[in-house]
Image (cartoon, grey):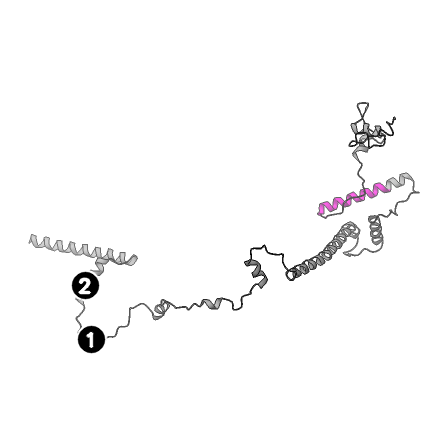
């Protein structure tokens, strides 16, 4: 009895082990490709389990191809033959060079400059460009002048209600500014007014101008350059208005350079005393 029980236990354990292996195999095959050894075993078992068919039954059944593959897929995989003809891509009429160029090309002589026929279109193009350039430059200059005038007269349009054309007093002021820009005199200056009143008018005008420029700077508006103030030369500034005409004062002494001495003696730097006003002919001048 003990031997039979042992045999049954061994058979049960072997069956459970095979079942576990089959479950693991099925899980693996569901995730990956099926194994080779198991596929052969299964196919042999299936063939054994299937009933044997006669040759007549097998001949009656028609082969329908592999399951899971459609005809469209097979047609798409068929290679397509494309005919290529090189003569179609070549242009029919190839431009030929003139005989003169071929002759010069085959000869050992250097090629001559381009003929007049080839230079004519280039000249015409250049002439057309030259004709267009002055017009465009003139238009650009005209636009620049209009822009400068607009910037110069922009402060006159502040009091108007969105009008681009100056009217009344603003128009007169614009005309006066244009006359001054062309080199005319300022009509608004009154010479017979007392000095105190004239200084007050000038100070008020300068204050208004500074205020206008400050507001424009804060608003980000570009204005014209202030050309009313004249630049004083550094030489005049150093001399104080009463300096000497020749040389310069330094430490209470009059310092003369070589050039000043040569000017006094009447000599030039390059002539060496011959080509100046007071050369050997006239002698040295004393001052």
Q: Residue furthest front?
A: 108
Q: Quadrant of residue 53?
A: bottom left
- In this orientation, which residue lies closer to the viewer: 30 or 264? 264
Horizontal side of 15 relative to 268 (left or right) equals left
Residue that protrudes farthest toward the right in the picture: 192
Secondary structure of the residue carrying numbered label 2: helix
Q: Quadrant of residue 285?
A: top right
Instruction: Please count the marks in the image.
Output: 2
Q: Is residue 243 visible?
A: no
Position of residue 153 in the picture relative to residue 192 (left or right): left
Instruction: Residue 59: tell me if it is visible.
Output: yes
Residue 62 belongs to the span the image colors magenta = no
Q: Residue furthest left?
A: 1
Q: Nearer the viewer, residue 226 or 1?
A: 226
The quarter of the image holding the N terminus is bottom left
Q: Which mark is residue 77?
A: none
Q: Position of residue 114 (x, y in %)?
A: 63, 58
Task: Identify the image quadrant of the C terminus.
Answer: top right
Of the pair 141 and 177, the residue shown nearer to us: 141
Predominant secondary structure, magenta span:
helix
> In the structure shown, which secondary structural element does the residue marked by tag 1 occupy?
helix
CB contact under 8 Å: marks 1 and 2 = no
Considering only order in the chain, which callout, 2 or 1, is on the residue closer to the N terminus? Answer: 2
Q: Residue at x 57, y 60 (%)?
A: 103
The answer to which of 119 and 32 lies nearer the viewer is 119
Taking 164 as reference, is 185 above or below it? above
What's drawn in magenta, residue-wise? 201-222
Residue positioned 20% across, 65% down in the render: 46
Q: Read off the residue under disc 2.
A: 44
Q: Which residue is mark 1?
A: 57
């Amino acid at each position: 009895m003990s031997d039979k029980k042992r045999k049954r236990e061994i058979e049960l354990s072997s069956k459970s082990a095979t079942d576990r292996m089959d479950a693991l195999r099925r899980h693996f095959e569901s995730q990956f490709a099926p194994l080779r050894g198991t596929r052969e075993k299964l196919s042999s078992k299936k063939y054994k389990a299937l009933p044997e068919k006669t040759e007549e039954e097998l001949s009656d059944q028609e082969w329908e191809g592999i399951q899971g593959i459609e005809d469209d897929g097979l047609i798409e995989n068929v290679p397509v033959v494309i005919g290529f003809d090189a003569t179609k891509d070549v242009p029919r009429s190839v431009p030929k060079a003139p005989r003169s160029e071929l002759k010069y090309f085959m000869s050992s002589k250097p090629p001559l400059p381009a003929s007049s026929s080839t230079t004519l279109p280039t000249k015409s193009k250049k002439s057309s460009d030259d004709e267009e350039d002055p017009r465009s430059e003139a238009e650009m200059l005209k636009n620049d002048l209009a822009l400068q005038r607009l910037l110069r007269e922009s402060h006159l349009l502040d009091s108007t209600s969105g009008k681009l054309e100056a009217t009344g007093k603003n128009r007169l002021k614009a005309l006066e500014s244009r006359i001054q820009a062309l080199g005319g005199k300022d009509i608004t200056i009154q010479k017979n007014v007392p000095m105190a009143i004239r200084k007050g008018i000038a100070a008020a005008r300068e204050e208004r101008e500074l205020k206008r420029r400050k507001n424009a700077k804060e608003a980000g508006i570009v204005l014209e350059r202030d050309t009313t103030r004249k630049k004083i030369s550094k030489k005049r500034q150093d001399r104080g208005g009463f300096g000497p005409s020749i040389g310069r004062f330094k430490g209470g002494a009059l310092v003369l350079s070589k050039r000043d001495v040569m000017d006094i003696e009447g000599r030039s730097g390059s002539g060496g005393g011959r080509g100046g006003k007071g050369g050997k002919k006239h002698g040295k001048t004393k001052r």
